[in-house]
Amino acid sequence: MYKLLITILIAVVLPACQSNRAIVKDIDAIHKQERNGIKLYQQGHYARAYEELGELATWGYKDAQYYLAFMFLKGQHLEQSTLIGMGWLGVASESGIKEWVELYNALYAKATPTMRTKIDAVVADYKHKFGMKAQFVSCRKTQTPPSMKIAIKCTKEDKISKVYPLDLNESQLNL
């Protein structure tokens, strides 16, 4: 009887304890992937940059979100979309990087009232899915020698967060 109870317990409880397809990556590997994606973007290799940055953007990494915003805004490898691009730029601006916030505000100011309403909805949805709080990401500003340029370095906490797919065209948006 005891062996039967143990067998049932193992058969029922162990599968429930298994991972729900959690993705585990070393933080140094993530930062390397992000740097590589940015380098590829700057070199004009947009398809390869998207492969590197798309996943990280959904995990809440701000540099990846910023570059993904431009890929959508300019239609670089992806279908051009002002709404999706502004969504990514809006969520990337959570970082507080002055230039990013100013760019978002300048582009937003040029939008029509109808477009602003749609942008607000996309940004709110993206913050809910891909924002710092939603993805358990904390970011800090650093200065890198020799230029002393301000950079942002984000770290994902060791918590499980929901993985959402990327919206690749406007028909997939929650409007």
Image: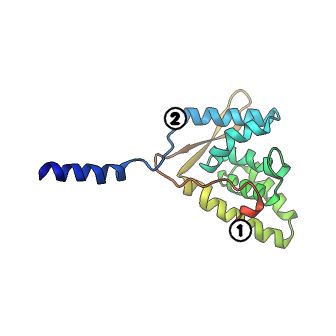
Estimate the x, y position of residue 6 in percent, counting from the top left.
Answer: 19, 49
Estimate the x, y position of residue 78 in percent, counting from the top left.
Answer: 79, 48
Task: Determine whether, in the image, residue 132 is placed left or right of residue 9.
Answer: right
Residue 117, image quadrant: bottom right
Tag 2 secondary structure: loop
For the point 72% across and 54% down, the residue is 88
Relative depth, front residue between 84 and 149: 84
Task: Determine whether, in the image, residue 166 is placed left or right of residue 75.
Answer: left
Which quadrant holds the C terminus? Answer: bottom right
For the point 68% across and 45% down, the residue is 54
| Residue 160, above or below 42 | below
Badge 2: residue crowd in 10 Å (few <14, some 14–19, many ≥20): few
Estimate the x, y position of residue 134 in percent, counting from the top left.
Answer: 55, 57
Task: Determine whether, in the image, residue 47 is placed left or right of residue 56.
Answer: right
Residue 141, image quadrant: top right
| Residue 130, above or below 110 | above
Q: What amino acid type is highlighted by mark number 2? A: Asp
Tag 1 secondary structure: helix
For the point 87% across and 69% down, the residue is 112
Q: Which residue is label 2 attached to?
A: 26
Badge 1: residue crowd in 10 Å (few <14, some 14–19, many ≥20): some
For the residues labelled 2 and 1, the Cα–Cα distance comes to 33 Å
| Residue 131, above or below 152 | below
**Residue at the left extreme of this rendering:** 1
Which numbered disc covers residue 46? none
Q: What amino acid type is highlighted by mark number 1? A: Ala
For the point 71% across and 63% down, the residue is 173
Q: Which residue is label 1 attached to?
A: 121
Tag 2 near tag 1, CB within 8 Å: no
Nearer-N-terminus badge (2/1): 2
**Residue at the top extreme of this rendering:** 146
